[in-house]
Image (cartoon, helix red, strand yellow):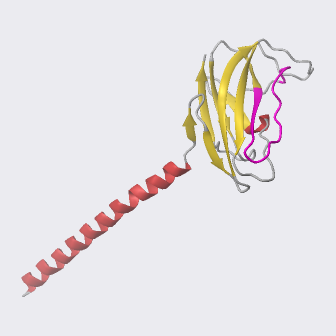
Amino acid sequence: MNRKFIIICVSIFAVGLFIVAIVAGLKKPQEKDNDNAKATEETSLEDEITLKSQEGNYSVKITAVFEAEPNSTDENAPKAERVAVVVYEYKNTDITDGLSIGNTHFKAYDKRGKELKQYPQNGLFEPSEIGESGVFTASVAFALNNDNNYLKIEYYNDTASKKPDATFEQTW
């Protein structure tokens, strides 16, 4: 009788471990999917990103990135051998109070991962507030002090956030 008791106990224990392993295996992909949902959306030039904020929905896309000669009347402008101008478009889907996306929503990095300073380039398209269903094109410039023709551009819905809502990469 002791032998039967031991076999039954071992069998119950093995079945219990099997069930725990199956349940644990089912939970891991769900946790992984949650991590993917929180990941920054990486896009290419001309890809439109649709975003949701507390106020409503809107979209952003980078329409062009080009190099320009530094041209600023601002005496506090950072040193720049070259300037990368980023042209972007934003659409207000349903924000009733209006939408304006300025240069503070963007950060850029060079190929080495160094954050680039914004440059007050003359002749940029300044952002403007648009109403519901409106579309607007604006631009922001970054000081370049190397010969790399690469930009990683991060967009932040919340300018105080440490995590970008979208990342665009561009070479020229």
Residue 156 in the magenta stretch? The answer is no
Q: Where is residue 57 in the image (x, y as percent from the top left)?
A: 67, 50
In the picture provided, is 2 more to the left or to the right than 71?
Answer: left
In the picture provided, is 75 more to the left or to the right than 139?
Answer: right
Q: Where is residue 30 in the image (x, y as percent from the top left)?
A: 43, 58
Q: Is residue 70 above or below residue 117?
A: above
Near-viewer residue (73 or 128) = 128
Near-viewer residue (126 or 148) = 126
Q: Position of residue 26 (x, y in %)?
A: 35, 61
Please name the residue shown 77% across and 28% down the image: 140
Please name the residue shown 79% across and 46% down the image: 131
In the picture provided, is 31 more to the left or to the right than 26?
Answer: right
Q: Quadrant of residue 149?
A: top right
Near-viewer residue (12 or 128) = 128
Q: Main secondary structure of the magenta part?
A: loop
Quarter occupied by the C terminus: top right
Please name the residue shown 67% across and 22% down the image: 65
Q: Is residue 17 above or below residue 96?
A: below
Which region is colored magenta? 120-140
Please name the residue shown 29% across and 64% down the image: 22
Quarter occupied by the N terminus: bottom left
Q: Is residue 33 above or below residue 44?
A: below
Residue 139 in the magenta stretch? The answer is yes
Count the marks: how many? 0
Q: Quadrant of residue 69?
A: top right
In the picture provided, is 130 more to the left or to the right than 32?
Answer: right
Near-viewer residue (142 or 16) = 142
Seen from this angle, which residue lies furthest front?
Answer: 133
Q: Position of residue 155 (x, y in %)?
A: 68, 38
